[in-house]
């Protein structure tokens, strides 16, 4: 018997049925909750192992045996966000510990900072 390697064939019927069930459930949940965005992910993991069966004449034959595992998941996006902007007069310098640090531009003037950087001292 030959098996079709296509989602349209009988081989992957359980995968397609799981996808269809998840699609219907996701659409129903989105409708009930009044949500507008969602996604469905189908993951198909394939493992291919070598086997060496022995025929009736005692000869070994190398065959490759595939194994398929599937996972269908859905995600519904319910956006709830807060946003803003931090727009202080910061300058990014290297701190005494060597890590990046923010200092207020008001703490010293720009010319002093440039002079220190040119001298190789980047730490505020």
Image (tube, grey):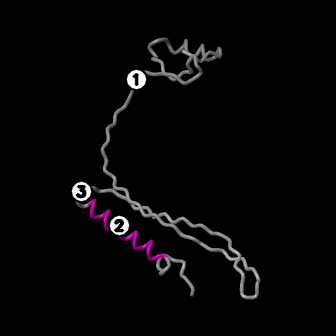
State which region is magenta: 12-30
Q: Residues within 10 Å of mark 3 (few under 14, many from 20)?
A: few
Residue 38, given in percent of the width and then of the height, sits at 35, 58
Q: Give the mark nearest the N terminus, 2 or 1.
A: 2
- Discs 1/3, front: 3
Question: On the image, which quarter does residue 47 sit in?
Answer: bottom right
Residue 27, given in percent of the width and then of the height, sits at 30, 64
Which disc number belongs to residue 13? none
Q: CA distance from mark 2 to mark 1?
A: 47 Å
- Discs 3/2, front: 2
Residue pointed to by mark 3: 34
Secondary structure beneath dot 2 equals: helix
Relative vertical location of residue 77 with respect to residue 14 in this rendering, above or below: above
Give me the residue at 40% from left, 70% from top. 18
Which disc number belongs to residue 23? 2
Which sits in the foreground, 75 or 89? 75
Q: Give the mark nearest the N terminus, 3 or 2.
A: 2
Which disc number belongs to residue 88? 1
Q: CA distance from mark 1 to mark 3?
A: 39 Å
Q: CA distance from mark 3 to mark 2?
A: 16 Å
Give me the residue at 75% from left, 80% from top. 60
């Amino acid at each position: 018997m030959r098996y079709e390697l296509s989602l349209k064939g009988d081989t992957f019927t359980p995968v397609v049925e799981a996808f269809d069930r998840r699609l219907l459930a996701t659409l129903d949940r989105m409708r009930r909750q009044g949500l507008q965005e969602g996604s469905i992910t189908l993951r198909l993991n394939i493992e291919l192992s070598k086997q060496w069966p022995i025929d009736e004449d005692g000869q070994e034959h190398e065959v490759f045996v595939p194994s398929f595992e599937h996972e269908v998941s859905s995600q519904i996006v319910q956006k709830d966000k807060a946003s803003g902007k931090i727009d202080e007069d910061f300058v990014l310098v290297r701190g005494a510990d060597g890590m990046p640090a923010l200092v207020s531009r008001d703490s010293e003037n720009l010319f002093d900072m440039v002079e220190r950087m040119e001298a190789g001292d980047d730490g505020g």
